[in-house]
Image: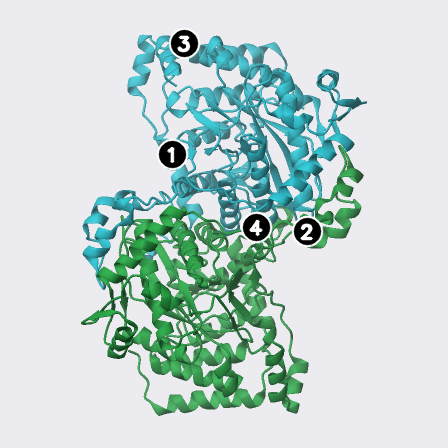
Chain colours: A cyan, B green
Amino acid sequence: MAEAETRRRARGGGGAARRAERTAVSIETARFIERNIPNFEILTPEALEIIEHNAETVLEEIGVAFVENPAALDRWRAAGADVRGERVHIPRGLARKLCATAPSRFTQVARNPARNVEIGGKSLVLAPVYGPPFVRDMAGGRRYATIADFRNFVKLGYMSKWLHHSGGTVCEPTDVAVNKRHLDMLLAHMTLSDKPFMGSVTEPERARDSVEMCEILFGRDFVAENTVMTSLININSPLTFDATMMGALEVYAAANQACIVSPFIVGGAMAPVSVAGTLTQVLAETLAGVAYSQLIRAGAPVIMGAFVTSIDMNSGAPTFGTPEASQITYGAGQLARRLGLPYRSGGSFCGSKLPDAQAGYETANSLNTALLSGVNFMLHACGWLEGGLVSSYEKFVMDADQLGTLHKMAEGVASDENAQAMDAIREVGPGGHYLGCAHTQANFKQAFWRSDLLDYKPFETWDEEGARDTQTLAAARVAKRLGDYQQPALDPGINEALNAYVAKKKAETPDSFL
Amino acid sequence: MAEAETRRRARGGGGAARRAERTAVSIETARFIERNIPNFEILTPEALEIIEHNAETVLEEIGVAFVENPAALDRWRAAGADVRGERVHIPRGLARKLCATAPSRFTQVARNPARNVEIGGKSLVLAPVYGPPFVRDMAGGRRYATIADFRNFVKLGYMSKWLHHSGGTVCEPTDVAVNKRHLDMLLAHMTLSDKPFMGSVTEPERARDSVEMCEILFGRDFVAENTVMTSLININSPLTFDATMMGALEVYAAANQACIVSPFIVGGAMAPVSVAGTLTQVLAETLAGVAYSQLIRAGAPVIMGAFVTSIDMNSGAPTFGTPEASQITYGAGQLARRLGLPYRSGGSFCGSKLPDAQAGYETANSLNTALLSGVNFMLHACGWLEGGLVSSYEKFVMDADQLGTLHKMAEGVASDENAQAMDAIREVGPGGHYLGCAHTQANFKQAFWRSDLLDYKPFETWDEEGARDTQTLAAARVAKRLGDYQQPALDPGINEALNAYVAKKKAETPDSFL
């Protein structure tokens, strides 16, 4: 961190940079969470051993497919796998052995070094929703997302105290050509926020663009020596690794940039309907994916991911915030810790079309599970609506507020002399009142977590003020945040170079919307 | 259970009873939960020992007040306590020793023996909201509760699959005289439902009426030998046991009926602002209260309770679903287990005025915590709104639906051969699809928990059907449930005797609304 600071000072030493620093408004962001509480372990040691044994059987006997990727097959063959066609049979124990070179914890550097995050161990880093093609707000309803929406969500993320990470595709900017949107998205993260962010994965070429833009933002030497992006590589479950995603992973791992290797599973469709069966497949898939990242570059930072949801067997709709999803999230956390890998899972998941009570129940079920599962990187931590089809403005700020509860829960319970409060109990005695006692006066400011958004008012006040529900309060908050937003300082030279890069890249090829 | 069934058959042997049985509609109720998952333990062994040591110090040095209750002071003196005025100083270790005669698990019998519940060990029994003077529904808004509302909530509870218990004061019937409402409330629980219920605690005399009505319902000999009520005895925190509540406890303990001995604490007001300090006071208070129940009758069933909420230090409002409340709920569970006592805590807590997203977040935070805290008896498990001032019709059915998730979570993760699903993974292979495979076909009906209320529809269908939010769906469900309600069969002779008892008692004294 100290190194990064020095570098930035040296590079941004011009008068313009100093002026920008002086006029910038500093936004308070909480440090990433370091848990001081245990994890919840739902699987017995026997169940863990069965699942681990079965996952190795899957890798050896059934194998995994690396499709349209002859170089990957060569790498696997060289590593000792039995490759038949595009099917890679990995001898028992090999994948786990290859995973051993992946770091158990790593730092992702942000352009503001105070916002660097550490991923792994007891940490929990919170990043916003990823991928929805639609947005919804209370005034405008549901509509296709645009680059203007994208920028708004980056701004909201920047201003959210409990969000440590700017994320990636906070919504799909559908009004920008498919082959160029990654440039606009990265430019937004780099210039409208100073939190860490994710790179593009939709083509290997776009991953290379992401690295090049980081080299402009951070300096080429710095990127060679530091992890400045964490990007999302989905496995095509069951047991398939497609060339696009693997191509992006190859770019990032070679550049020592972090990847989340994550199956995206709707249970009963892309994995068995049982929790133990799904965990077996998740483990087999992530073992193979993480091992492959280490074949690209031993020591490259990588996160074991599990995105698993249940399904409504009546309609085929994916369902969220359900007990089976929680059981899988808990179990996958145990498997990740036994592998010594950072773990990605959880999020503000819900199936609801509106930020209503259903959204609240399902989201809180998911967030609480993620905290106690030992998740290290939580994508989708705020703003997720309608099964991930929609980025919701109101739910973004509602969820972001609730993320504060995770910070406080994770602190655990102090038992020092002040926390024991024996003097207060003595002072107040039977029938007394604690509000005025010395211990309360000394501690009340930090004692209780307080929502910055939800309604705590007396009924009469609330009623007089319009009997507003949570969505209405959140809509007002969104408007205020976007109105108050001020761009964080950035070296004007870097800003210019980034914009020039994007303009040049866009001019090189015609628009494609496919 | 077999014994109870025989008894009922013998007593209800008339033709009218048989006719009533034949025409009655059977409502499906899930068995109480038996956890197959571990508890979450937030306190270290060191912290537990500190809190236990300090609680004994509180009891010995500060003592507890038993006010306006000379007989209680005599009992404590005889047991070895140092009584000064109304202050009872309990020597270190004495209260814990007295608690040892309380059963760690007991059965509360219902008039339908299939609905008996066991409280303690790994069980979790769910009971509805208790105490609100107001009700709210979507059409009528917020208003004072009446006996008609009370009966509606008993009916909704009876028809809720995941609710094991009919509860007590599901709302305050404010249109019935204060000195007579307990009679109407008990009559409703006894005749409109066949689930177990709670007795009156607002005067010792009303506790005696409760026992007498149970003697009519179950038979005098049966009540002498079985626990047929679980009633809520609040401690007047800090450290005070008032004569009214203790008088009710004395009646119930003497009759071998169960009591929940529970502080009602708004943190920072009735207890220190710190979690460890609050847990110390909770433990001291419940040790004294449970010990006192055993002085009345060694072996009387009793539950250690903890109702603790945080406070908004800006406004003084109690707050719900917050991290400190969760930490206390987890910690108190550990303390209860070390005492070997059944544990009451948790509920569908929220501060929201409406069944909106805030209600959903806060309620889910509370329900999940209660499940993982090892709670054995969860009062307020559905219907709680606005900090407990309001029983919400819509939230009652919304929460009651979510209680299904606790049942599924508590089952834990199977790891038998069917659950391992290796044949399915082999059958489907890389790139395949599980929806049609044999394992899915054999298991899909039980595989995933499914809400019976929330929206899982495709966006277009949902939109065409009116874009309904959760509250709107719930309002329709309430209307349907109340429309479909059919009274469970009851021996007409018993029904008549209960009504005659209530009429006689009401006629004996003038109405009082104080």
Mark 4–mark 1 distance (CA, rounded to whole Å): 32 Å
Q: Are marks 4 and 1 in contact (CB under 8 Å)?
A: no
10 Å neighbourhood of mark 2: few (<14), some, or many (≥20)?
Answer: many
Q: What amino acid type is highlighted by mark number 4?
A: Ala
Q: Is residue B242 or residue A55 the one in the foreground? A: A55
Q: What amino acid type is highlighted by mark number 3?
A: Gly
Q: Is residue B220 or residue B296 the one in the foreground? A: B296
Q: Identify the subunit bearing mark 2.
A: B
Residue A40 vertical position relative to residue B107 in the rendered view, above or below: above
Query: Which element carries disc 1, helix, strand or loop?
Result: loop
Asked if residue B25 lies left or right of residue A426, the reply is right
Mark 3–mark 1 distance (CA, rounded to whole Å): 28 Å
Q: Quadrant of the C terminus of chain B?
A: bottom left
Q: Identify the subunit bearing mark 3.
A: A
The image quarter containing residue A86 is: top right
Mark 2–mark 4 distance (CA, rounded to whole Å): 29 Å
Q: Are marks 3 and 1 in contact (CB under 8 Å)?
A: no
Q: Quadrant of the N terminus of chain B?
A: bottom right
Residue marked by disc 2 = B447
Query: Which element carries disc 4, helix, strand or loop?
Result: loop
Residue marked by disc 1 = A161
Can I make out residue A386 in this image? no
Residue B208 pos. (x, y %) = 39, 83
Residue B275 vertical position relative to residue B204 in the rendered view, above or below: above
Q: Is residue A340 or residue A134 the one in the foreground? A: A340
Residue marked by disc 4 = B467
Tell me, yes or no, whether dots 4 and 1 are on the same chain.
no
Tell me, yes or no, whether dots 2 and 3 are on the same chain.
no
Q: If you read the primary sequence from the N terminus, does the residue marked by circle 2 or circle 4 appear first?
A: 2
Residue A79 pos. (x, y %) = 70, 18
Residue marked by disc 3 = A493
